[in-house]
Image (cartoon, grey):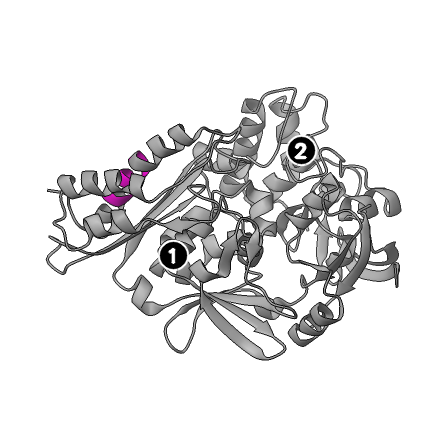
Amino acid sequence: MKDQFRMVEFNLNGRDVAHVVDARSSLTDMLRNDYRLTSVKKGCEVGECGACNVLIDGECFNSCLYLAVWVRGKKVRTLESLAGPGGELSDLQQAFIDETAIQCGFCTPGFMMTAVEILESGREYSDDELRKLLSGHLCRCTGYENILRAVRKAMHRRLEGPAPARP
Amino acid sequence: MYDIKELYEAESLQEAVALRLEHPGARVIAGGSDVLVQMREGRLAGQELISIQRLDELRGVRLDDEGSIRLGSLTSFSQITKSPVIRKHIGVLGEAVDLVGGPQIRNLGTIGGNTCNGVTSADSASTLHAWEAVVELTGPAGERRLPIRDFYLGAGTVDIRPGEIQTAILIPRASYDRTWGYYYKYALRNAMDIATTGCSVNARLSPDGKTFERVRLAYGVAGPVPRRAPSAEAAANGRPVDRATVEAFGLAVLDDIDPRDSWRASRDFRRHIAVEMAKRCLAESVRRCGGELS
């Protein structure tokens, strides 16, 4: 391949970064191997399971079906961006714990990033709407009920209380 | 890591056209939800790719000078669903593409990719056929437009010539004016599934609401390419807006479709549901037109 290694400048979890990446890499490959962001899970790698889900410019994408070079100039957020500077859990993470929405944890980062997109819309959704919004993720342990409850709880808390100061 | 032989990243439409001419064996990649999956499965392994992902000029929905709805080919399914122009004039298209895959796939997949892959089950395809969409292609000789039914040549084959890039899909004003429609996707799951059969109907009623002025129907997965149902349309056009017309419309569908047996469903089952879907879609279209079935 000509120009196999290409410079990619983008914003990752609030920091401007630059990296030379193999043009054949998926975004999952780059985030895991080059930035050690292992919350981005490798599941099906064909866009079915949602384990590798990240936010790009505020919208959810399965990073397995996204070429690493495509993030040039974009803002990418992974689960690692949710906790505070001292490692404090975000309201969403706490809601997942409170509702026991985690068992093995493999699907959790993907679900949480979709939940971030849901919460940041600032809208209140019905349970049916939430189910549809969360339908791009597979969980093989807990069933989906507790995950739905956790997202609903976080949504209601944000809509009621003052928005927490998080980037 | 993907098994990509070469990746050419176009920065402008002109460059994309030049790259297409220079590398005739390369596949165009837009969102990637189709090409990258096929690459992973091995069917497209070792392929040269031309990425048009950065051509932001091909994104977005707007009304053009002639009043046509213009969907840039790189517009994602979720952008279509959210678009105020789509909601106002052709809401059924936003609803249809909101049934593709799951939320992340709808942020990734593009209307151009959904039509250029020439797949009969594409959730946008039956609605675009039923609304007589026009496909715009840009190539070395400039722009070319053709009706979407001529764009589909056969299963997985569309009329894209050397050097061409699909740049937009247009819905003419005469097609969407006073017209409302409904799309029914029959699939085994509510998300992340491909249509067993898809049915898109739209109707325009006479001003008094008593007569069907124009009814159009198209199916996905009722043949190798998305197709209209002319017998069914003839059974409704100019007829009274009543249950008898809806029944006749549904039954006439059987003269129009030729589905196949596949692991997803049998031909007989597809014929059975096609009739029922047509009737439900027409009844709902009437309701959306503000009419009532007598």
Numbered-mark total: 2
Q: Which residue is mark 1?
A: B87
Give the main secondary structure, helix, strand or loop, of the magenta stretch.
Answer: helix
Between marks 1 and 2, how big is the CA–CA gap?
35 Å
Query: Which residue is pictured at 75% across the width and 52% down the height?
Result: A67
Q: Which residue is mark 2?
A: A93
Look at discs 1 and 2 and give the one toward the viewer.
1
Q: Nearer the viewer, residue B239 or B57?
A: B239
Q: Nearer the viewer, residue A80 or B149?
A: B149
Which disc number belongs to residue B139? none
Same-chain check, marks 1 and 2:
no
Query: Which residue is pictured at 44% across the width and 43% down the height?
Result: B223
Label 1 sits on a secondary structure element that is: helix
The location of residue B145, given as percent across then percent down, is 48, 71
Q: Is residue B260 visible?
A: yes
Q: Which quarter of the figure has residue B25? A: bottom right
Region rendered in magenta: B276-283
The location of residue B28, given as percent across then percent down, is 67, 60
Residue A129 colored in magenta in the image: no
